[in-house]
Image (cartoon, grey):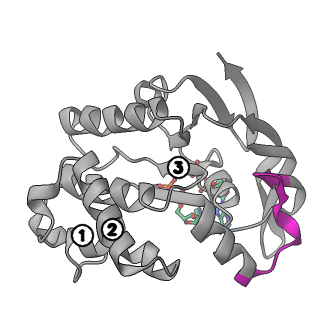
Amino acid sequence: MIQLKDVSKIYRMGTSEVRALDHASMEVEKGEFVSIVGPSGSGKSTVMNIIGCLDTADEGEYILDGIAIEQYSETELAGIRNRKIGFIFQNFNLLPRLSAEENVELPMIYQKVKTADRKRRVREALERVELTHRRHHRPAELSGGQQQRVAIARALVTEPSLFLADEPTGNLDSHTGEEIMELFHELHRAGNTIVLITHDNQVADEAERKICIRDGKVREVRI
Ligand code: ADP
Ligand code: ADP
């Protein structure tokens, strides 16, 4: 499903350079729930950007679903992201002027899904995250946990190959965080592939497998 082979990413600033990823290799199989865990500055955002096709590696190879990502243009990558990846962010990234159901519907509008199909899938997705009763509310009228549920519904509605979550519980209290983690377990049980990126070991331990990253190196893969 995902293969990073000897991937490096180098940021240059004037004469200095930072190797944010240093010959990092990892594999994630279809249907796996994997966490990538490391302290601040270890390279998590960088690896998230590469796995999410938001940025490309300077060295090495990234293969997503059999596609070697480096050969694609920005525009093509945007299409790949849209079709294949369901992003879930720490700060939810919902559009503030749209209601919960409009936020969930949006990626299907980009994908040109027919109206009736869209409406049905929005309904099903909001049921799955137990937010039907809040469907007309805007993000500001929802709690953090509810906003993250909307974001998860928005991710799952397009049936992505990969759910890519960046500190999804980072802005939530621990009880709400646990409820959100339960939704990830449900997605996993339903056969989805999940990569969760976090600095929090306790959150990382919820996955089936943990990939540790430090100073841009994949240090340890504990099963
Ligand atoms: P994390 O998400 O684990 O905090 P990052 O991937 O953001 O780590 O950063 C890894 C390293 O690369 C850090 O030393 C950071 O300062 C550096 N870095 C990240 N992005 C940039 C950038 N755009 N320009 C320069 N240095 C960067
Ligand atoms: P996170 O909280 O997700 O780890 P970071 O604070 O590490 O986020 O980084 C947020 C964004 O800022 C990253 O995507 C990265 O590109 C950029 N960034 C991180 N460190 C630096 C840096 N030293 N110089 C410039 N940009 C950076």
Give the image location of residue 92, x and y in percent: 34, 61
Tell me the residue at 25%/56% (across/down).
126
Q: Earlier in the sequence, mark 3 or mark 1?
A: 1
The N terminus - image quarter:
top right
Image-quadrant location for residue 141: bottom left
Tell me the residue at 33%/68% (across/down).
104
The answer to which of 122 and 103 lies nearer the viewer is 122
Task: Point out which mark residue 101 bears.
Answer: 1
Front label number (3 vs 1): 1
Which SS class for mark 2?
helix
Q: Earlier in the sequence, mark 2 or mark 3?
A: 2
Front label number (2 vs 3): 2
Tell me the residue at 74%/28% (across/down).
219
> What is the residue that sits farthest to the top in this orientation?
223
The answer to which of 17 and 220 lies nearer the viewer is 220
Task: Point out which mark residue 163 bears.
Answer: 3
Residue that carries the numbered disc 2 in the rendered image = 104
Q: Is residue 33 above or below residue 216?
A: above
Give the image location of residue 189, x and y in percent: 46, 29
Q: Is residue 21 visible?
A: yes
User: In the image, is the residue at mark 3 within 8 Å of ligand 2 by its beta carbon?
Assistant: no
- The magenta-colored residue range is 62-75
> What is the three-letter code of the residue carrying label 3?
Phe
Image-quadrant location for residue 5: top right
Tell me the residue at 90%/58% (across/down).
59
Circle 1 crowding by C-alpha within 10 Å: few under 14, some 14–19, many from 20: many
Say whether marks 3 and 1 touch (CB < 8 Å): no
Circle 3 crowding by C-alpha within 10 Å: few under 14, some 14–19, many from 20: many
Say whether marks 1 and 2 touch (CB < 8 Å): yes
